[in-house]
Image (cartoon, rainbow, N blue to C red):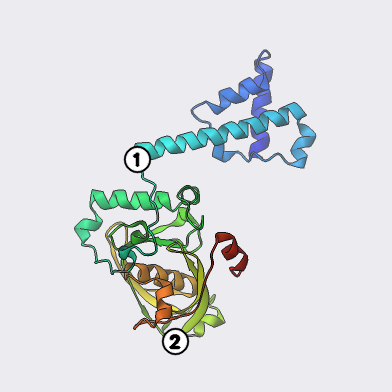
Amino acid sequence: MIFMNILATLYACRNKAKHSSLSTITRRLMHSASFNCHYIPWKITAYDRCLLSPKAQEQIRSMSSQCDSKDKKDNENQCEQQNLQLLKLTAETDPILHSPIEEMRLEDIRSPETKQIVANMIYSIRAKQLERANAPFTKAAGMAANQWGINKRIFLFCPKGNDGEAKVVFNPTYKPISPNQVSTDPTKTKSEDQFTNLYREACFSVPQAYGIVERYTNIAISYVDINGVQHTDEQLSGWKARVWQHETDHLDGVLYSNRQSGIKYGPNCTEFHRFQTKSEFDESYPK
């Protein structure tokens, strides 16, 4: 409907300005203050092709291409204005990944320096930025600050892999809870009645590898949010609980692959598979 309204507006404008071409009008519309590329579904459907001439279709595609360039430039300008920095992942052998990160004080959490670090983290976890940084994956369920070489007890939590929903977590902890302690939830699956469960995990800090890792199925968590508010005794289950444990492990100086080495606390990594190349990993990683 929005697409057809845009077309109707274009043709109405053309009728009022008979000497203006459709491409001229579309350019004027694009550069107007109220124009926003994100609100227009640029894909031309079979129904649209019945209504549009080949020339008009090509002009719409041209608008789409110009919008992509305009959006990219706008995003780059916005990032420059905010002084956002693209963070690069640190190497698997870096000591910062193998040492516990100290708890942050409240004044540190609220400091301008930390706010800038968080902004850089949120920027760097975006799919396009992960690709720019040559990360092993372009989607993340979470990322700890020390994976970027930052000595702060912070992680981003986005278990659905949607970087737009990344939750900023300071000073996270967790403890296992038995299934009968879990709050009643009608959506709870049968597997969530188990104390621990096995599932595969991969990690940005352990490239071209994956493991089968045992984790607590249900956990009680505590953390400080981005506003400096303390949260206690919230509960997570299943995949969300797994992601929380994985990211908290990072801040405790533990990689999932270390859990195969008889780590003294918590569940273990029961299998570990490492590959020579990314293509080998992509072919072997269970879908």
Please indicate whether residue 169 sits to the left or right of residue 23 in the image.
Answer: left
Query: Residue at coordinates 43% horizontally, 57% vertically from top-left?
Result: 166
Task: Say left or right for 271 vs 49.
Answer: left
In the picture as drawn, the residue positioned furthest to the top comes out as: 19
- Element at badge 1? loop
User: Going from the N terminus, do you reach mark 2 or mark 1 first?
Assistant: 1
| Residue at 48%, 59% in the rendered image | 140
Q: Is residue 233 visible?
A: no
What's under tag 1, amino acid-wise? Answer: Gln
Q: Compare residues 271 and 130 and report the one nearer the observer.
A: 271
Q: Is residue 282 above or below residue 111?
A: below
Toward the viewer: 136 or 237?
A: 136
Q: Residues within 10 Å of mark 1 (few under 14, many from 20)?
A: few
Q: Is residue 284 left or right of residue 171?
A: right
Whole-number angstrom distance, CA of label 2 to CA of label 1 = 47 Å
Image height check: is 192 above or below 94?
below
| Residue 39 on image: x %, y % | 57, 40
Which quadrant, please, contains the N terminus? Answer: top right
CB atoms of marks 2 and 1 within 8 Å:
no
Q: Is residue 246 left or right of residue 48?
A: left
* Residue 88 percent coordinates (x, y): 39, 52
In the image, farthest residue toward the front: 276
The answer to whether 263 is drawn above or below residue 54 in the figure is: below
Kindly identify which residue carries mark 2: 180
Q: Position of residue 103 (x, y in %)?
A: 24, 66
Which numbered disc covers residue 211?
none
The amino acid type found where label 2 is placed reads Asn
Provide the residue designation for mark 1.
82
Q: Quadrant of the C terminus?
A: bottom right
